[in-house]
Amino acid sequence: MIILNSPIQPKFILKILLSWWQDIIMRKSQQYSEAQFNFVYFSYKPDFEYLNISLKSLLQNTKITDIRNIYIYVDQKDVFTSVQVKALANLSSKIIFRKINNFEWGSPKSTLSEIQCYLSLAEEIKQPDDFMIKVDSDIIFIKSNKLHRLLRSNYHAAGDAHFLDYNFIQGGMYMIRMGEIAQNLSKISLHDIENISQKINSVGEDKVISTIFEEQQNSFHCTRLMLFPDEYKKITNRSSFTRWEFCCMHFHRDKENMRSYFSE
C-alpha cells in the first residue's frame, strides 16, 4: 500500500505508528548535541562501483558537520587497485582505509571480525556519544533529515526491521552508540556467536547482533530507514513524507540498478 508516495505494510501499521510516536517523544536530547557519525563500510574490489556511488550519495545528502569519519574496511582477498583507492580517497578527506584479513562473508567468523572492528573504533575514537553506522556498499542515501534526528535522539542503537518482519534489524544499515559497543559487544566470543547462529538458524551478522542486544535487554530502536526494491520501484517520486521516514535506498539483490537511481 502506498500512502503519500510512501510504502506502508498494513500488517505493520501499529509498529509504524509506534515508531513515529517514539521518534516524536525521543526526538532530541541535549546530551548528544556534540555527537557525530562514524560510517563503516566493509567492501572490496568487485563492489567498487557500488561503493563509489554510495559514498557520493552519502556526502551529497548528509550534513557534513554530522560526519566525523568514514571508514572503509577492505577485504584483503580482493583489494582495490591504486587508481580505485585514489578515486575513493578524493571524494572526502574524512575517508579512512583499513584492512580486514581472513574475512569470511556470512559466517560467525565474519561477524566476530566486524564486531572486533567496531570495538577497535570505539577504543580509538573515544567518543561514547558518537554513532557508529554500518553501511553496505549497495546503499544510496537520499536527501533526508532522519539520520540527523536519530543522531540527536536518546536512542542508543537503531536499525530498520521492517524488511525482516520486525524480528531483527536488517544489515544494510544500522547504528550503535560507541559507548554501547563496548558495553554490549566486548565480551562476545566466536563460541557465543556460533551458539546464537545455531539458535536463530542464521549466520547473518545483523540477526546475530540484534539477538545479542535483545538478550542483554538493550534492544535496537526499530524504525524505517531503508527503501527496498519492492518499495522504491513503486514510488514515482519521493515526497517530503518519504524523506521524513526514510534516509536511503537499499539495492538488496538489485545492485545493477544503482546507477540508474543515482544522479551526481
Image (cartoon, helix red, strand yellow):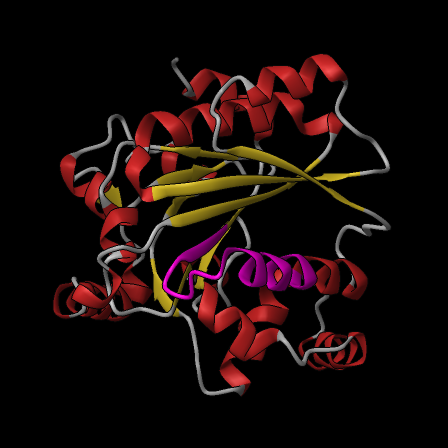
Instruction: Using residue 61 as the reference point, say whether residue 183 is left or right of it.
Output: right
Q: Is residue 50 a member of the stretch shown in magenta? A: no
Judge by depth and name the residue closer to the eye, 252 or 43: 43
Judge by depth and name the residue closer to the eye, 23 or 74: 74
Could you say where residue 207 lies in the image, as x and y percent from the top left? 60, 67
Could you say where residue 76 lies in the image, as x and y percent from the top left? 83, 38
Residue 167 visible to the viewer: no
Q: Residue at x 82, y 52 (%)?
A: 104
Could you say where residue 251 lies in the image, as x and y percent from the top left? 52, 35
Total marks placed: 0
Q: Is residue 122 a member of the stretch shown in magenta? A: yes
Tell me the magenta residue range: 115-133
Instruction: Using residue 175 as the reference point, say whether residue 90 is left or right of it.
Output: right
Instruction: Using residue 170 as the reference point, say whether residue 208 is left or right of it.
Output: right
Q: Residue at x 35, y 50 (%)?
A: 36
Judge by depth and name the residue closer to the eye, 33 or 190: 33
Q: Residue at x 22, y 53 (%)?
A: 149
Q: Is residue 231 above or below residue 92?
A: below
Quarter occupied by the C terminus: top left
Judge by depth and name the residue closer to the eye, 134 or 248: 134
Instruction: Using residue 22 as the reference point, say whether residue 157 is left or right of it.
Output: right
Q: Residue at x 45, y 23 (%)?
A: 56
